C-alpha cells in the first residue's frame, strides 16, 4: 500500500490581519499579492505593501509557514517593469515562491532569479502532462496549480506522469465558470478584467438600488440581479447574474455556489496532490480562520486514520450552496 503524503494547506491572505489569522489557524502556506495590478485580486483595501510583506513573511516563518506571492496577471505589452519589480522584490524579501502565469515573466524570473522557486498559476490553465512538462523543463517550475476541470482520477493520472513536479488544487471557495484566468466578461461592462487588471467587477462600478419589493444590483449601469425583501443581495458579477431569456428568469451561466471538498479529502490525498488551496483573498479574517481550521482538522484526521470530522461551512459558502465541482463529474 502506498504511503500517504501529507498535503500542504495553502491559504489566502488579502491583508496582514488575514495572514496572521491563517498561520494561527494552521496554514502551511499563505499566498498573498502586492497592492497593484500584478495580482488577480487588485481591490481597494486589499493586498500588501513591500513593508507589510516583509513583516508578514517574518511572522509566517516564525510559525513555520511559507509565503507565496501571486504575480499572476499578464504584463502589459512593452510595459513589464511593474511585474519585473514584483518578482525582484519577492526574491529580495525571501518569499518562499512566486506564482506566475505569463510565459515571458516566467522566462524573466528563471533567468534573473534562478534561486527563486517558481509555481505555475491556475491562470496558465496547464491541465495535461505535456503542458506541465513544458513549463517544468523550460522554466524550472516546481509546482502547478491545476484548473478546476479535472476529476480526481484524472488528477492522479497527471501526478503519475509529471513527478517530481508538484500539483496544487483548489479545495474550497468561489468558482469561475470561465476558463481559468481568461475571463473577459467583466471587461465588456467595466473595461477591466481579472487577467489584465486584476479585478473582476471592480467595486467602483457596483451599485445597489432600493426599489419597490427589494434591491437591484448593478454593474456599470447594467442590472445584474434583483433580490426580494429579506433576500441576501449578492455581489454583482456578470457570470452569476439572473437574466430573462425566452420569458424565463434564471442564472444563465452559473448559480452562486462554493466549492467544498471536505468530504473528499481522503480521495484527494490518495491522488498524490502536494497542496490543497483555499480561495478567498478578498474575504475577511473570520472566513479565513473558519475555513483554515476546518481543513486543518480534516487533513489531520485523514493522516491520522481518524474519521472525517463533521464540519458545517454552510454559513460562509456563496449563496449558502456547496458543490464538489468537476472532482466527481459524472457527465462524461
Image: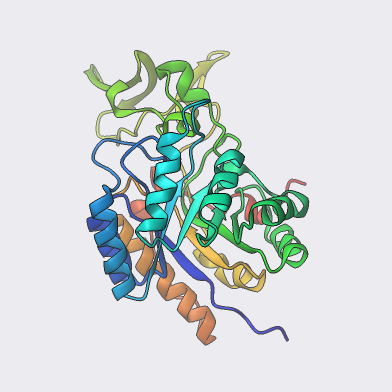
Residue 107 in which image quadrant = top right
Q: Judge whether 245 appears above or below 20 on screen.
A: above
Q: Is residue 127 left or right of residue 118?
A: right
Residue 22 in which image quadrant = bottom left
Q: Judge whether 142 appears above or below 247 on screen.
A: below
Residue 280 visible, this angle: no
Residue 141 x/y as whole percent: 61, 57
Q: Is residue 208 left or right of residue 245?
A: left
Residue 172 x/y as whole percent: 47, 55
Question: Seen from this angle, which residue lies furthest front?
Answer: 112
The image shows a total of numbered marks equal to 0
Residue 165 x/y as whole percent: 66, 64
Residue 54 in which image quadrant = bottom left
Residue at (57, 46) in percent of width and height = 106
Residue 91 visible, this angle: yes
Q: Is residue 41 left or right of residue 187?
A: left
- Taking depth in this image into account, of 169 and 101 the one nearest to the observer is 101
Amino acid at each position: 500500500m502506498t504511503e500517504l503524503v501529507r498535503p500542504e494547506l495553502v491559504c489566502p491572505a488579502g491583508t496582514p490581519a488575514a495572514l496572521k489569522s491563517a498561520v494561527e489557524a494552521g496554514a502551511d502556506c499563505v499566498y498573498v499579492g502586492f497592492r497593484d495590478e500584478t495580482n488577480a485580486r487588485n481591490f481597494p483595501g486589499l493586498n500588501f505593501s513591500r513593508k507589510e510583506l516583509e513583516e508578514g513573511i517574518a511572522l509566517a516563518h516564525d510559525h513555520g509557514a511559507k509565503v507565496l506571492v501571486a504575480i499572476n496577471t499578464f504584463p502589459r505589452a512593452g510595459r513589464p517593469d511593474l511585474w519585473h519589480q514584483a518578482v525582484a522584490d519577492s526574491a529580495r524579501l525571501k518569499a518562499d515562491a512566486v506564482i506566475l502565469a505569463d510565459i515571458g515573466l516566467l522566462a524573466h524570473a528563471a533567468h534573473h532569479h534562478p534561486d527563486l522557486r517558481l509555481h505555475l498559476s491556475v491562470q496558465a490553465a496547464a491541465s495535461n502532462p505535456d503542458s506541465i512538462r513544458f513549463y517544468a523543463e523550460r522554466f524550472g517550475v516546481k509546482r502547478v496549480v491545476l484548473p478546476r476541470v479535472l476529476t480526481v482520477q484524472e488528477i492522479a493520472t497527471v501526478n503519475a506522469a509529471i513527478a517530481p513536479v508538484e500539483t496544487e488544487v483548489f479545495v474550497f471557495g468561489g468558482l469561475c465558470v470561465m476558463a481559468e484566468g481568461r475571463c473577459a466578461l467583466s471587461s465588456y461592462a467595466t473595461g477591466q478584467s481579472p487577467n489584465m487588471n486584476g479585478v473582476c467587477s471592480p467595486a467602483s462600478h457596483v451599485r445597489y438600488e432600493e426599489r419597490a419589493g427589494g434591491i437591484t444590483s448593478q454593474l456599470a449601469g447594467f442590472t445584474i440581479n434583483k433580490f426580494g425583501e429579506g433576500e441576501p443581495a449578492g455581489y454583482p458579477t456578470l457570470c452569476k447574474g439572473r437574466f430573462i431569456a425566452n420569458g424565463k428568469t434564471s442564472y444563465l451561466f452559473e448559480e452562486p455556489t462554493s466549492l467544498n471538498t471536505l468530504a473528499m479529502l481522503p480521495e484527494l490525498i490518495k491522488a498524490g496532490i502536494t497542496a490543497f488551496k483555499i480561495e478567498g483573498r478578498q474575504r475577511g479574517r473570520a472566513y479565513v480562520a473558519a475555513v483554515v481550521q476546518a481543513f486543518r482538522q480534516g487533513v489531520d484526521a485523514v493522516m491520522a486514520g481518524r474519521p472525517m470530522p463533521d464540519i458545517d461551512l454552510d454559513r460562509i459558502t456563496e449563496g449558502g450552496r456547496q458543490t464538489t465541482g468537476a472532482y466527481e463529474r459524472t457527465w462524461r
